[in-house]
Amino acid sequence: MKVRIAYLEEPPFYWTGEDHSVTGADIELAEVVLRAIGVTSIEHQLTSFEELLPGVQEGRWDMNVPIFVTAERAERVAFSLPVWALGDGFLLRQGNPKALTSYAAVAARNDARLGIVAGTVQLDSAKSAGVIDSQIVAFKGQTEAIDALLAGKIDTYASTAVGSRVLASANQELEVVAHEKSKDGRAPVGAFSFSKGNPDLLQAVNEQLRKYLGSADHRARMAKYGLTRTELDSVSAT
């Protein structure tokens, strides 16, 4: 049994290593789950964020790495059980010269430029906080956004707080600011996604996720990539 899974270049969740192998927290989770349900061959397909949903819908691959679950996306694809809950964060140049600590702080400064990967939930969050189109610079992927940040073309890059922490730890020119939690204390959840025409694979993955999420092995594997109980407990089944 072979499964093709599409991924992006977004550490610590999924990326291509220097040896050209595909790695990351969600890649490892997919590997464990798929092997447990009898998959003998896993093929990784690098793609862009904008192609994730169309690609799995059209059958170019069988499943996507986890992304945030939204009602709009759920109309197009079938999501698995949630595998993490992540708050947003800003990646900035050291010193945070414009004191950008939230989307509202960006909205309050006409000279602030916010980088976002096109189509991500961070765009909706920014606009909801009053950030206007002229302040937003959209990129196809994370690498382009970070290059623009380092070059001074944008003031901050909005992503997950976990992802931003990992990126900042690898570059002394950068720092991270985690956003405050919502009033209810809940963070948006992410999940694998599948074509709605492939219910058997979805069901098999969900059955294994119910058994595996929250286990000692799961926590240990995710901890290697910086995911803690904060990101895992609210979605763990055990």
Image (cartoon, grey):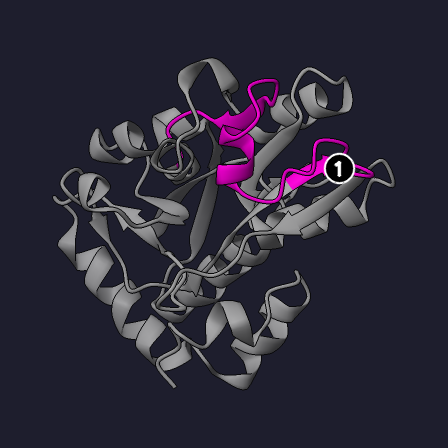
Q: Which of 131 and 191 is in front in this view?
A: 131
Q: Which residue is drawn at 45% across and 26% down?
A: 48
Residue 161 visible from this viewpoint: yes
Q: Which of 193 and 137 is in front in this view?
A: 137
Q: Nearer the viewer, residue 34 or 95?
A: 95
Residue 94: % across, % down: 82, 38
* Residue pointed to by mark 1: 96
Q: In which quarter of the image is the C terminus?
A: bottom left
Query: Against 221, is 156 above or below?
Result: above
Q: Does the magenta stretch include residue 151?
A: no
Q: Which residue is drawn at 14% across and 54% down?
A: 199
The magenta stretch spans which residues? Answer: 91-120
Q: Is residue 118 magenta?
A: yes
- Label 1 neighbour load within 10 Å: few <14, some 14-19, many 20+: some
Q: Which residue is drawn at 55% across and 32% down?
A: 106
Q: How many marks?
A: 1
Query: Relative to 198, is 68 on the left or the right?
Result: right
Query: Relative to 71, is 170 on the left or the right?
Result: right
* Residue 99 placement: quadrant: top right
Q: Could you say whether the residue bearing mark 1 is in a helix, strand or loop?
A: loop
Query: Against 152, is 15 above or below?
Result: below
Q: Which residue lies furthest to the front in this view?
A: 108
Query: Relative to 160, is 64 on the left or the right?
Result: left
Q: Kindly identify the amino acid type of the residue bearing the numbered disc 1.
A: Asn
Residue 34: % across, % down: 40, 61
* Residue 57 placement: quadrant: top left
Residue 112: % across, % down: 60, 23
Q: Quadrant of the N terminus?
A: bottom left
Residue 12 visible from this viewpoint: no
Q: Secondary structure of the magenta portion, mostly?
A: loop
